[in-house]
Amino acid sequence: MNRVKATVAYDGTNFAGYQSQPGMRTVQSEIDKALVKIHKDKAIHSVASGRTDAGVHAFGQVIHFDTPLTLPADRWRMALNVLLPKDIRIVEVEYVDKNFHARYSATGKTYVYKWSYAEVHSPFERNFSVHLERWRPDVEKMKEAAAYLIGTHDFTSFCSSKTATSNRVRTIRLLTLEKSHDELIMTIEGDGFLYNMVRTIAGMLLAVGVGWHTPENVKEILELRDRKEASKTAPSHGLYLESVTYDN
C-alpha cells in the first residue's frame, strides 16, 4: 500500500462541515466517494488534518489515504478533480512515508478570518466574509487585545463548551489584524486549535474593536477559564483554513 498526501481547497458554503455525517453533504464524503470510484468500488477512507464546521472554507486542508495504486502524483490530482464537485479542488498531491499522518503529524495550522467594510456587501462575497454593516472597529485596540492571546495558555474561555478534550492548553504563535481594501483580515497561527477556538477569538476581538470590551478584559477572561465570559462565536463563513504545517 502507498500513502498519498493531498492538499485540498473547498468552498464550505454548501457543506455540513468537513467530516462525514450520515445523510449530510460533507467534504470528506465527497472525497471518499471519488476515491471509491477510482478504486472500482473498493472502500478507501481519507484522513484529514482536522474537521471544519459547516460554512468554513479552506485553501489548504491536508488529507492522506492509502492505496494499492501507483498513479503518478499529477494523475491523482487530475483523476480526483474530474470526479469531485466544483466546490472542492485537489491542489497538490505527493507520495509520503507510511509514518506520515495528516492529523497526528501536523505541527501547526494557520487560519484566516475576513470581515467586510463595504458599504454594500456584494452578493458575490456574502458567503466569504462577514459584513460589518455600521460597525467600524478600532483595529489598534483589537491588536492590543490580540497580544494577550499570543503564547501558551489554557484557552477554555475561547472554545466551545462542547469541546471533548480536557487539555485546553494551546500555543498561538502569530495573531495579526490588517486592513486590506474593504476588508479586515485576522490571521492566526498555532500548534493546534480547540473546537470553535478561532471563531471565538475573532468574536472577542471584534467585541473589543467596537467597544463592548477593553483589551485588558481579554487577559482577564483568558485567566477566568470560563466560556460564558467571552463574546459570541463569530459566524463560520468568514473563516478559512489557510494551511497546515509539518516537520520535514
Image (cartoon, grey):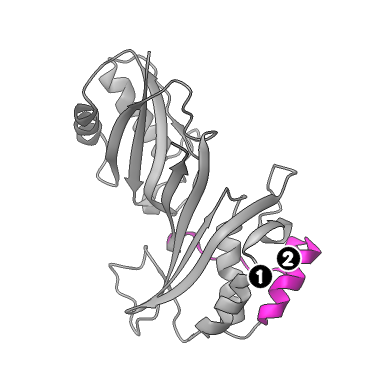
Q: Residue at x 28, y 38 (%)?
A: 92
Q: Residue at x 70, y 50 (%)?
A: 169
Residue type, numbered disc 1: Tyr
Magenta residue check for 236: yes
Left or right: where 174 falls relative to 115: right
For the record, the magenta segment spans 214-237
Residue type, numbered disc 2: Leu
Percent position of residue 145, x then y: 62, 75
Which residue in the structure is indicated by mark 1?
Answer: 148
> Residue at the right extreme?
224
- Name the magenta segment's main secondary structure: helix
Closer to the camera, 20 or 103? 103
Residue 222 has which mark? 2
- Mark 2 and mark 1 in contact (Cβ < 8 Å)? yes
Percent position of residue 220, x then y: 76, 72
Q: Indicate the quadrant containing the N terminus: top left, top right, bottom left or bottom right.
A: top left
* Number of other residues with Cα within 10 Å of mark 2, as a class: few under 14, some 14 to 19, many 20 or more: many
